[in-house]
Image (tube, rainbow, N blue to C red):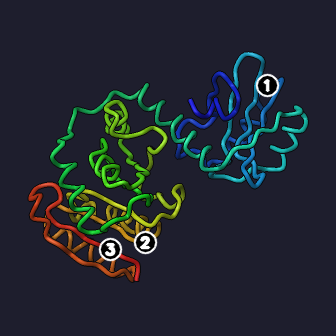
Amino acid sequence: MRAAVLLDLDDVDFIEPNFERLTDNSYTNQLLTLPAKQAKLLISEDEWPLALAIGDGKSWKAGSFLLRKPTEAVIERAEELEAEILQEERHDWEAAVREWFSLRIAREVQPAIEDFTPKRAVLVEELLRQVWGDVEGETCIDACCGSGAGTVALRQTGIIPLSFDNDPSLLSLGLHSGRLAPEDTICLDGTKASNYLPHTQLGMILMAGEISQYNQIFWRKIIEEMLELTEKTLVSTGTEKEALLVESWSKDKGRKVAVIENKRDAFYDNWICDIRRS
């Protein structure tokens, strides 16, 4: 795994149980109380602490500071243990952390039943080219990615995907099938996405729905999180009614919206909201 390689170790476990808990400061305190004989401190290109790994002579545990600030006690513990200092670029460590937690899902979670249709990925690729044109090399957040149909289409258009969903069984399916790459995949509650993800030019939510009076609050929050994170956001729905709801929520946030009937796919992505920052 990349995390172990970057820490120059044969193997390492994270003290945090899942990606979302990387924001939880209590794990910093737990890390500092572990029995320790040696340590490694990983710093970024600008010398910001990225992780502290603690070894007890038998195994290594690491805590990551991608999404929470290291405390003075972390530095003091590293100095006390005469920690080896390692340096890597932040984006490499980000990918390594995503990979570690994704591979854990792939090992521990039973994959969902296969739901992928190659034809849909082709249709989504055509849609992306129609709406966004040539954006090869840009990063796109694939929100509510499921098992990775949209992620496949993004790669086929030369876009770099950063995919998330809150259903580990669907992620496990996508990881086992190869549609989702561990280093680009996160198990995450979309209503809190802006706490975890970087700002990107592009964002996508395929098949947002079924949006009803019972789950509107949920979907509106996810879409608003994506609008906060991205400059251009593509949202597909099954019905025009759902698309008009997405349009109204987006306009409430000051975005420009074009609602388009997507006749190439009359089931999954029948209606499209092309949302752009004003």
Q: Which label's residue is closer to the chain start, 2 or 3?
A: 2
Looking at the rendered structure, the kind of residue marked 2 is Glu
Q: Position of residue 176 (x, y in %)?
A: 35, 30
Crowding around mark 2 (Cα neighbors within 10 Å: few <14, some 14 to 19, many 20+) is some
Q: Position of residue 40 (x, y in %)?
A: 78, 33
Q: Position of residue 7 (x, y in %)?
A: 70, 33
Residue 231, label in figure: 2
Residue 35, label in figure: 1
Question: Mark 1 or mark 3, which is nearer to you?
Answer: 3
Q: Cα distance, mark 2 to mark 1?
A: 46 Å
Question: Mark 2 or mark 1, which is nearer to you?
Answer: 2
Q: In percent of the image, x 18 and y 59: which residue is there? A: 269
**Disc 2 element:** strand
Q: Cα distance, mark 1 to mark 3?
A: 51 Å
Q: Which residue is mark 3?
A: 275
Q: Which label's residue is closer to the chain start, 1 or 3?
A: 1
In-image side of 239 versus 26 (left or right): left
Where is the C terminus found, in terms of image quarters? bottom left
Q: Name the foreground residue: 189 vs 144.
A: 144
Decide: is 3 above or below 35. Answer: below
In-image side of 164 versus 49 (left or right): left
Q: In percent of the image, x 54 and y 58: which residue is there? A: 195
Q: Which label's residue is closer to the chain start, 2 or 1?
A: 1
